[in-house]
Amino acid sequence: MYNTITAIATAHGVSSISIIRVSGDAALEIAHKISHLENIIPRHAHLTSLYNFNNELIDHAIMIYFAAPHSFTGEEIVEFQCHGGMIVAQEILDTITSYGVRLAEPGEFSKRAFLNGKIDLTEAEAISKLIEAKSVDAAKILAKQMKGELKTFVDESRDALLRSLAYSEVMIDYAEEDIPDDIMNSISTQLDALTEQIEQIVEASHRRRGLIEGFKVAIVGKPNVGKSSLLNALLSYDRAIVSDIAGTTRDTIEEQVRIGSHIIRLVDTAGIRESDDTIEKIGIERSLSSVKDADVIVALFDSSRPFDGEDAKILSILEAVEDKHIVVALNKSDLDRVFDITKLDAYEVLEVSAKKAFVKLTERLECLFDSIGEGEELMLISSRQIEAVNKAKISIEEAKVPLMNGELEFFSYHLQEAVKSISSISKPYDSEEILDKMFGEFCLGK
């Protein structure tokens, strides 16, 4: 029974229902032994008692049998849906393993589905990312990939490359025959169109990656502008220490918070200023690093204090930022304004109060995240996919030079490399070791 695997497919902890999954040739045999049922109908929910190895009652649960090849893995699968909690699910799992079934490795169910032709790599990665999706938009994108949207792009791109490759092979084999004069220009035009499409997809994927991973929002400003107060207000609890002493926050604090339909990573940074304190200087360096890593920067200024050199330092940091969304907010709007707001004329300024009213800020962020999620562009959801299309793009560009010089053998070589790269998104030419590494990032039970 070693080839049959099992795992708890639901998250650990207290819940209404836990699911234990078994896949492999012995799955149906295990179902008979644990349920004591003689007749188990495929795709039928059996409400039945479950018994351990010593024939003692474990639970009254639902059992569903999926006959091969009509299952997620393409193998015999049985799922036990028992009452939630660690004890019952673990006892069922222990009973299954006591009959010789081994525990599944991370991602092994999905790996078997791939090896048995039930899903390709684009669908497998979409399943993995969907579990960790940080927004409704991300879930919609990943659902499309599970339906084969990215696979369609890969197949169409591969076919376009193969057509150009076929033309090249014909010209090599029949060099002395009459071939239309415009055929090279036609091939070049096709490759240019594919290159442009790849560039658009890669750009959209980088721009919208926060939909999958969660947008990183860094709150920056000089000391005592209310960064930690704003973090606490957004989280609805006192996560960061707040005091009137400049330099209280000496390290970055990162927490997750939901804004609209998005779960974002909110980072409170140390106040940026000149300092001789070694520890504070390290915190400031980390603040500047957070600015570089962030998708969105919320720059806070204090309405109740005059514009000074430290505020000017914050503005210089914002001016040096490229390809970032910047939201400028004037905090402590409930106090008398002393700050010269004309210093912020380059930005649309929100007036907020971290202690009383910051709805305008959350509304602005929600609109910003929603706008990033808009559009029907295809999206690559992993660094592996982005690397593959970039390699294909490089190979296509390298193929253009020998094409225009009539060096068709070199053109064909580079085009074959492009085909391999683009195809690897859904069906890699890599070894079993590479597959183990990729699927090993999955959670148990998937």
Image (cartoon, rainbow, N blue to C red):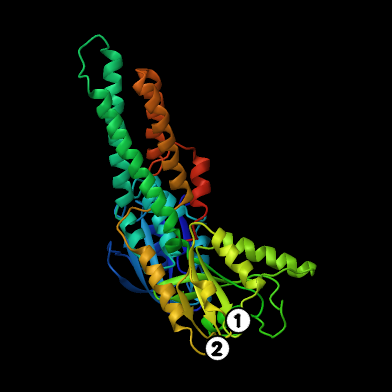
Question: 208 or 17: which is nearer to us?
Answer: 208
**Residue 278's mark?**
none
Question: 214 or 280: which is nearer to us?
Answer: 280
- Displayed quadrant of residue 180: top left
Of mark 1 and mark 2, the one earlier in the sequence is 1
Look at the picture and state if 58 lies above or below 388: below
For badge 2, the amino acid type reads: Lys
Judging by the rendered image, the residue that carries numbered circle 1 is: 226
What SS does tag 1 mark? Answer: loop
- Looking at the image, can residue 270 be seen? no
Question: 37 or 273: which is nearer to us?
Answer: 273
* Mark 2 Cα shell of 10 Å, populated few (<14), some (14-19), many (≥20): some
Residue occupying the point 41% across, 40% down: 424
Residue 93 pos. (x, y %): 50, 66
Question: 306 or 302: which is nearer to us?
Answer: 306
Confirm or deny contact between disc 1 and disc 2 (CB under 8 A).
yes
Look at the picture and state if 121 lies above or below 442: above
Residue occupying the point 44% across, 67% down: 134
Residue 322 pos. (x, y %): 51, 57
What SS does tag 2 mark? Answer: loop
Residue occupying the point 32% across, 54% down: 377
Residue 399 pos. (x, y %): 39, 27
Look at the picture and state if 219 lies above or below 432: below
For badge 1, the amino acid type reads: Gly
Judging by the rendered image, the residue that carries numbered circle 2 is: 355
- Looking at the image, can residue 397 be seen? yes
